Image (cartoon, coloured by chain):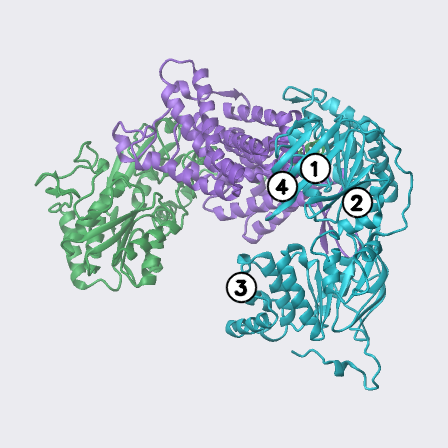
Chain colours: A green, B purple, C cyan
Amino acid sequence: MRKRKHALAALVVAIAATGVVLAAGVGAGSAKSNSAFKVAWIYVGPHNDGGWSQAHDAGRLYVQKMLGSKVQTTYKENIAVGAQLQQTVASLVNQGYKMIFGTSYGYFSKAFAAKYPSVLFEQATGTDVAKNLSEYFGAAEDSVFLSGMAAGAASKTGDIGYVVAFPIPEVIRHANAFTLGAQVTHPGAKVHLVWTNNWFDPAKEKKAAQSLVAAGADVLGQNVDSPATGQFAESKGIPWVGYDSDSSKFAPKSWQTASVYNWGPYYLSRVKAAMNGTWKSGFYYGSMKSGFTGIAAFGPSVSAATKAKIAAKMKAIENGSFYEFTGPLYDQSGKLRVKSGVRMQVLKGGTNSLYGMSWLVKGVVGSPKG
Amino acid sequence: MRIERRLRQPRWLIVAVPAGSLVFAFFAAGLVLYATGHNALSSYRQIVDAAFLNSGAIGQTLTQATPLAFTGLAAAAAFRMRLFNIGAEGQLFMGAITADAAGLYLGGHGWPTALVIFAMVIAGCAGGAAWALIPGALRAFFKTNEIITSLMLNYVAAYVLTYLVFNTESYWRQTKGFNASVFPTSKTLPNDALWPSAMIHARGGIALPLGAGIAVLVAFLLWFLFTRTRFGFEAQVLGDSPRAAQYAGMRTRRKILAVMGISGAVAGLGGASQVGDFAHMLDADPNGLQKQYYGYTGIVVAALARYNPLAVVVVAFLIGALQNAGNTLQGADFPSGLVGVMQGIILFSALGGELLVRYRVRVGRTMPATEAA
Amino acid sequence: MTVQSEKDRRGADGAPPPPAVEMRGIVKRFPGVLANDRVDFEAAAGEVHALLGENGAGKSTLSNILTGLYRPDAGEIFIDGEPVQFHSPRDALDARIFMVHQHFRLVEPFTVAENVVLGDHRGEGRTFRLRHRAIEQRVAELSKRYGLAVDPRARVWQLSLGEQQRVEILKALYREARILILDEPTAVLTPQEADVLFETLREMAAEGRTVVFISHKLHEVKAVADRVTVLRGGRSVATVSAADATLRSLASLMVGRELDSGQPARARTPGEPVLELTDVWSDADRGDSAVRGASLVVRGGEIVAVAGVAGNGQRELAETVAGMRRATRGKILVCGKAIRAGDPRSAIAAGVAYVPEDRLGTGVAPSLSIASNLALKGYRERSSSHGPLLRIGRIREHAVELIQRYSIAAPGPGAPARLLSGGNLQKVVLAREFSGKPRLLIAASPTRGLDVGAIETVHAYLREAAADGVGVLLISEDLDEILLLADRVAVMYEGAIVGETSREEADVEEIGLLMAGGQDPRAD
């Protein structure tokens, strides 16, 4: 027993000694004062995940490129909500970061933002708005709808597999938009869901894709962050519709298109506002028209006819003459959920809210409860 | 060349080896840093700052160290008896679930906070113990390998945790309000179910969570139990030689059940502390608590502490510091993979050093001298 | 089959052929033990040669030398008159010497045919791709020819022990063994299976092979062997023709040392019975019953020895009385009261002390301190604990006292028990067992592996215990020890007490005969 104590004492002493030596040795050199505005991004997955987080990181690099030495940006990747997030934010604040973008729901709450009143927080996909907490997202339902059209056109049997993360309104709304799009180019198309209960889990996503193909799907789509589904589709020679980023390099033959986000311009405007003091908290919902969302370049197997159909719909959405979530909309059981002519709203509560959507449209096969 | 067990451990080794392995780790990691174009010294400086020196750093380290202390103690308690309970992870989840339920149920009714917290502690222990008793009973009555069963139950517990909040409208899930319909969340604990922390006014305020205090207390209790009681004596004999325990008339099955129960209860207490001290709700997100792997890291902590409960607390603090520093270090100019490599080198050196204390490397074919009396 | 014919082996000049195996002056030392002391052994082609001896007589060491597992410290080995040196078991295999060990060397998930070819570095075993069909056919041929009924495609784990033994013999035949050594092959067989095995062995010998049959069962030796070499205490004492020997003469060769009377036990007046066994049965670790209807009485103040060759149920009997093994039938009374079957605590409470055969591992917990081991049973007593709490100080004081009283050479009470030598370890066990103030002491092979000094100490403690009125049940394979200590001798054979005699009337030859199953109806 006594020996063990000695061992631990030695360990503590050694660590402390090393700390002192290092502190003394480097102390002078690290006092590089920097007047650049410090902005940080927190990602739920790796910054090069080929999907969601990579799209955000592209936005960060855009900000860095546009503002040059006036800003200093960094990111923290693979950050779990809870203790790890709290530590990460604390250390960022400690290092002088004044603005933090959290790119996943559940990172920042009003109470959390209140702990750091001098720091500006922005959170993607959430709804909590406070004095120093903003929310932002894009109307990806429009672009997902268009990517669904590509999926429907690529399908021969009308059975499309869709790998989905969590049974939450964001994903449900995208699954619905995707289905509605597929039904435009392939009337009666069915979209089969497999939930992974994770945003980024390549192994699980691949398994989900496998089971979908085994169940008869001849096209795959996804609302998860990694390109694992696409890699599997490529190995089977099945068309694939991605999400978040242009991931054609992971599956060059299977690639159709994807709904993508262009976070850069939003980030740039917000960072600029923060630097010159005009930043105000709010809820931003970017559209296709503003260039916030869009669809990626088409793959080689997409026909000219399909491209034309998608371009026409895109134009209609942009000029307001078409909106996919306009009634009549029926749910899986065939019940009328949105009356003819009624448009669904983004934030308003109730059944008409996109942000509270908990039911799946007719043609989706799967449970909205996961 | 061969490796043989040391019969006696010279005193100087016990000091030299940990220090030496630390120096080795810093050199080895330094080479990696140099090869990847980073300044080793400033990186180390950042580690020390982030772990101990920055304002609030100690508090952050404690946040990470507290659950590790619980899971480390859970592993130490079981491993001492050679019961390889790999299930602290799942037992922690279960403890979090039951403690959260107790907090939600009893809080907000004007009961004294101390009573609510006490109930949460008991509930957390019960939840963890019950989960650990499944592999315990299988081992005691059917001789099933507890490594496999306890490991498998970790996955079950993780799925249960996610299911409770993401896939069903359970008691734990927040169902009221617009926010709850946007993304599934747990109910937040009422104020009188939150665990208090003591503030030390130094270095920008160090918050000592109640859980950290409980962990230290549990460490002392376990140490006392294992060294000063009949129960501990029996567990020790059973761990060393089950045949000798049977020969001495000890009740083997009861002891297996009791030790697994204690181990699970301590892990479950870690879950209660997660809920009461830090999250203030049931963190069911697969990207949250489940990605921290406290249960598995606890095994490393216990091994480094040689299953001594008092040492577990110290080691947990150091590992917590290392993990905390890792979060600070990674970023645009420092890949998170490199952080993992550095942490791996440090842990590997520490464990390898342990080996050198217990074994020695002999070169040549000479027979070992008999050191026995 | 390429076994040389009688004609080939005869030299050109017609001189008698050299023996198939000859070992001269073999010496093998292990730390503290002289296992083989100038052993001479020879066996001719075409004979079944028995190697007879008590446990520890050096039979296994000798056969391990012949199969290249050990290298002798001195001595020579000749195969067909040519001197050979085996550096590894592989060399012995190349000389076509094969051994069937007591514990089989088989891979359980593999089939019989795969096991047969496994490790064979000639022919089929050497090719990368196994030709299953051909091997199976060859194995089937062999098994038919030698009456070794076993399905070549069965998996080994599905086979009975008898069948597994046949696989081992098939392995030897497949490799065209010229010299086959079998180490106590009948231990795992039923009498019927043993008879079949004997036929196979005779047949193999008739083909010109040499079969070395290791045993300590006299009637088997007589039934199967042509000649018998008797080992005793590491030396070869005689080689006799089996046909000329009687069970009695073999028994006396095997055990009949010049008896060193030493200090004969003083006549003690036995007291009340402390142990009464009536028709006790209990199971072996594996399979059948090990104790089969043993009945015995031990009175306070007397030493009753159970003699017998290892493996006849003595260890299991000791464990049954100590509560470590559940009695399946029969009655065990300690001081007139029944103890709970299979509950060591109940036996301890009734006053049963037990010095187990396995010191390190059962008798003591190796990594725990000497003090802890001295408290291994007494920790529940009021002197060592206070409710659930241990009285660490008292335990340590007690340990210091016992270390002194029993002069245990130890670095201190805190040192781990595994650092102690065998003799000191046994002192720790004895000190602890005596400090529990027992009524009955079971001592199982208490002097095995100890040096002369330690043996004397242990003997003295056992006598002292009896003088204090404790009933001592001594289990030993060493007849000298038994005759030196015991007031009464009971002989155990195949799980039952087959004879009982007082020390005064004890006849070594008689006991040896009983031990070796000489009274077995099958013997004559």
CA gap, disc 3 and disc 1: 40 Å
Q: Amino acid at mark 2?
A: Arg
Q: Residue at x 81, y 83 (%)?
A: C11
Labels 4, 2: one chain: yes
Q: Amino acid at mark 4?
A: Ser
Residue A187 sits in quarter: bottom left
CA gap, disc 2 and disc 1: 19 Å
Q: Earlier in the sequence, mark 2 or mark 3?
A: 3
Where does label 4 land, which residue?
A: C282
CA gap, disc 4 and disc 2: 25 Å
Where does label 3 land, which residue?
A: C111
Q: Earlier in the sequence, mark 4 or mark 2?
A: 4
Asked if residue B267 can be seen in this view, the reply is yes
Q: Earlier in the sequence, mark 1 or mark 4?
A: 4
For residue C140, above or below residue A79: below
| Label 1 environment density (alpha carbons within 10 Å; few <14, some 14–19, many ≥20) | many
**Res. C448 mark:** 2
| Label 2 environment density (alpha carbons within 10 Å; few <14, some 14–19, many ≥20) | some
**Res. C191 mark:** none
For residue C100, above or below residue C258: below
* Secondary-structure class at tag 2: loop
Where does label 1 land, which residue?
A: C365
Q: Residue furthest bottom?
A: C12
Left or right of B48, for residue A36: left
CA gap, disc 3 and disc 4: 33 Å
**Foreground residue among C501 and A210:** C501
CA gap, disc 1 and disc 4: 26 Å
